Amino acid sequence: MADIETAKLTFGDKVIDLPIMKPSVGPDVIDIRKLYAQGDVFTYDPGFTSTASCSSTITYIDGDKGELLYRGYPIEELADKSHFLECCYLLLYGELPSAAELEDFEARVTRHTMLHEQMQYFFRGFRRDAHPMAIMVGVVGAMSAFYHDSTDIGDPWQREVASIRMIAKMPTIAAWAFKYSIGQPFVYPKNSLDYSGNFLHMCFSVPAEDYVVDPILSRAMDRIMMLHADHEQNASTSTVRLASSSGANPFASIAAGIACLWGPAHGGANQACLEMLQEIGTVDRIPEYIARAKDKDDPFRLMGFGHRVYKNFDPRAKVMKQSADEVLGLLGIDNNETLKVAKELEKIALEDPYFVDKKLYPNVDFYSGIILEAMGFPTSMFTPIFALSRTVGWISQWKEMITDPEQRIGRPRQRYIGAPRREYTEIEDR
Ligand code: CMC
């Protein structure tokens, strides 16, 4: 044991040796699993800013360098050379596929794009004005009631089938949530199209007309999906891991992840960001909003700015910005009012000492909403698109967790600050 590096924790008359775990890249990790048993103390880390909740081989982020790697490959290179389904394969299985492996994977995903016909009635039970994320949480959770043959998490084959089903069906679910909200008929998937083209087809085609997918738009959509595919132990991924640590089935666990993603501090930021840009409305009102963002007594935050991990720049934002320029150029809307506000806000915030000192940079959601709006999506669809893109990440992390011998049910402890034990007071004595 002598060659194991340890950290020493000294408090009171206790000295506890804590093993140091080495990563392949990134900071060392102090193993505190025995701390409570040996020292009768807990650690305190709300928001898990200094806590590694698992060992993982999937995604690596260096927040200071602004680096994001999927299985070791930089996101910029993947965004340039790869495509979403190839990234899905990489995230799920750990290596880039050979041509034959990719063909087989694409065929498997493509053959699962349809939903059980009965699921239509599930959609139809919602109010037309339901938020598509509300529909997605419900429908994805309900998949466990439709696909009984892939809910046994102890069976590797069932896990594989559940994974493919979720990747394949999520665009159909998101597109149908959209169609339902605008009162148009559901459009069935078209398997001759690629993954992102098929999603655009299900969102924008109507039975009355032919719809041709623009390759630049489907490439931009594919990029949005790649950039959002995984992001190590973020809030929704940790939610999926925590939910499934109890042995919950994968559909229920992914539904929990979707619920978490919905929040405006996480995936809901792309909707909140575009709504904020629209609320600002004109460039001359930007200073008022910057002042509000800096005001400690005002809960307002500049949506699309800041990140828990990236403290220099968000590498996804760089790629997304380039995509935004391409898409807006193609659609000839490179100078609308929202875009003008976005560009000016970005410029002002990047020069303002408050944002510079706190290292608050535009994140991926600052640009993704601009592209999605230009494509014709309402703001309420932004977070569902994030959800369908992140599904592969959630599933890859879930699969990794299920086969991790160190995995246990997630059960954080607390610092109790409530009343100590006291006697019950009879009602007439209160
Ligand atoms: N506008 C104004 N001030 C901000 C902002 C912002 N967007 N973000 C952080 N700050 C300030 C914050 O008030 C705090 O100031 P102080 O130190 O004086 O108290 C400081 O910067 C540090 O903020 P924090 O809340 O401790 O940072 P965090 O790591 O807990 O939160 C965040 C990260 C992303 C939740 C936060 O930056 C935020 O709310 N941003 C806006 C929402 C957003 O765009 N979210 C999308 C994230 S990227 C997509 C994803 O991965 O889901």
Image: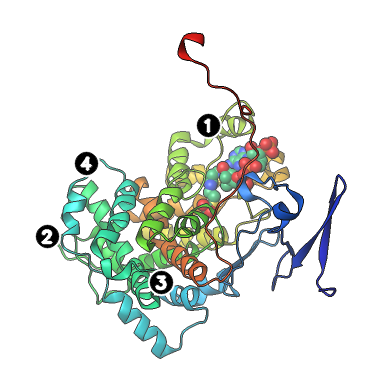
Residue 164: quadrant of the picture: bottom left
Residue 177 location (% of width, % of height): 26, 52
Q: Residues under labels 1 and 4: Cα distance? A: 36 Å
Residue 119 location (% of width, % of height): 20, 58
Q: Nearer the viewer, mark 1 or mark 4?
A: 4
Q: Is residue 178 left or right of residue 323?
A: left
- Residue 332 in sight: no
Residue 430 location (% of width, % of height): 51, 11
Q: Earlier in the sequence, mark 2 or mark 3?
A: 3
Q: Do the CB atoms of the residues marked 3 and 1 lie less than 8 Å apart?
A: no
How busy is the neighbourhood of tag 2: few (under 14 within 10 Å), some, or many (20 plus)?
A: few
Disc 3 under 8 Å from ligand 1? The reply is no
Q: Residues under labels 3 and 1: Cα distance? A: 56 Å
Three-letter code for the amino acid on which mark 2 is drawn:
Ala
Number of marks present in the image shown: 4
Residue 127 location (% of width, % of height): 21, 41
Please determine whether, in this image, residue 396 is positioned above or below residue 340: below
Q: Which residue is mark 3?
A: 154
How busy is the neighbourhood of tag 3: few (under 14 within 10 Å), some, or many (20 plus)?
A: few
Q: Which residue is mark 1?
A: 285
Q: Which residue is mark 4?
A: 127
Secondary structure under the numbered disc 3 in the rendered image: loop
Disc 4 under 8 Å from ligand 1? The reply is no
Secondary structure under the numbered disc 2 in the rendered image: loop
Q: Which mark is residue 208?
A: 2
Q: Earlier in the sequence, mark 4 or mark 2?
A: 4
Residue lying furthest right in this view?
Answer: 13
Three-letter code for the amino acid on which mark 1 is drawn:
Arg
Q: Do the CB atoms of the residues marked 4 and 2 lie less than 8 Å apart?
A: no
Three-letter code for the amino acid on which mark 3 is drawn:
Gly
Three-letter code for the amino acid on which mark 4 is drawn:
Arg
